[in-house]
Amino acid sequence: MTQQSHPQDPAGWSAPSGQPAAAAFPPPLPSATPQPSASQPVEHRPSAQEPPSRFDPAMLHVTEATRTYPCPACGGMLAFEPDSQALVCTSCGNTLPVSAEVARPAVIPKRELSSAMSQLAALQANATTSVSGDKEVVCQSCGGHTVFTGTLTAIRCPYCNTPIQRDDVQAAPTRLAIDGILPLQVGAKRAREAIEKWINTRRFAPNAFKKYRDVGSFTSVYLSYFSYDAATTTSYTGQRGIHRTETYRDSEGRTQTRIVTDWYPASGVVRNRFEDVTGHANTGLDDQKVTELEPWPMQYSRPYSPEFVAGHLCRTYDQDANQVFGALVEPRMEGVIDSTIRNDIGGNEQRIFSRDITWHTVAFSQLLLPVWMLTVTYKAKPFRVFINGITGEVQGRRPWSAVKITLAILAGILLLVVLYALYTYFGAEPS
């Protein structure tokens, strides 16, 4: 995907403001493929004594702080293939397994939120360099120039389609490390079938939207998430409402019944424990629809390895663990706490007057979670559809066709007129 050619990218990031449209004047390609210099690393290949599980298929490029995945059989490019859960060459079909250390599911450890963010703030205060912002790199396959914009950390070269990953962001001490990943399990074929089914059920969508194959962008992307565990104790005050049936006489003297609620004071202490409550950390997306992709099946978690991202887009976080917790996760946890309080109060109705939450532990980990994303621009407005890359669940928004809605209303009115005419005609006939 050519990053310079689209002011608005399908995964929700924008080209840097104030820059000219680079796609109109792309940098010239070199006359020949660049040869590795002394400053460039030689790609890693396993020795005869090295066990296969230690094989790292990546070629690291120190000068660009990037990595690529050349096929050892034909020189083409490897990409992580969901169906086989392995690296597959897009040219010759050669298959390489991912490293044995990350191939099996694992419980991803979490860090205490407050202390981790305090340490990060201290590192950022003393930092002399930054990895934030746009980064232009030279493709080590063809020599073309491409730009990592916004929070992108994995893209494809716009000239030769080589998957390229940034290493400097993940290794930066002033950034939170990625702890785990849920490898993509929904392949392109299954994702397109899910999109087809979803779009075909949107009966009042414009025909232009249904031609998404021609006018839309469909891609796989790993989004940045934070997953939280927490333990809380909450003291509360409120009221318990008990319903009873009351008999009374109305103004005409007739006996009637009504429900009356008697309220009684209530107070107490409740405890809650939360595990793996997730919140996405990327901006520019539809928060509601992305959240509705949950739940994420954490049993598929693996220790992070860039092999899983090969051939797919990837974003690092826009909002840190504190920001995501405060904006997305803490309100959801407080909603669960309120439900626990209401259950503790009991009765037919409940009122909560006050609650005092003590957060004993809040721990987090950073995860990369896979999403297929369709973006269709209709009347200058982007509409996005998301597919959970593990479960295949589809969530999204679509435009409405005013013409189709109007025709449906007119058809309904016409049907009512016809039915009324038939009723009037045959109803007037003698039996």
Image (cartoon, rainbow, N blue to C red):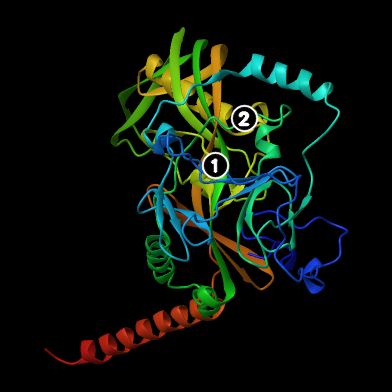
How many numbered markers are drawn? 2
From the viewer's perspective, is 150 left or right of 408? right
Residue ID for mark 2 = 177
Q: Is residue 301 visible?
A: no
Q: Could you say where residue 295 lies in the image, as x and y percent from the top left?
A: 41, 39
Which one is in front, 308 or 175?
308
Q: Dot 1: few (<14), some (14–19), or many (≥20) neighbours within 10 Å? A: some
From the viewer's perspective, is 57 left or right of 249? right
Among the 4 quarters of the image, the one containing residue 2: bottom right
- The relative height of residue 382 versus residue 288 in the rendered view (above or below) is below
**Label annotation for residue 247:** none
From the viewer's perspective, is 239 left or right of 35? left
Among the 4 quarters of the image, the one containing residue 219: bottom right
Among the 4 quarters of the image, the one containing residue 425: bottom left
From the viewer's perspective, is 272 left or right of 206? left
Point 41% across, 60% down: residue: 191
Point 66% across, 40% down: residue: 167
**Label annotation for residue 306:** 1
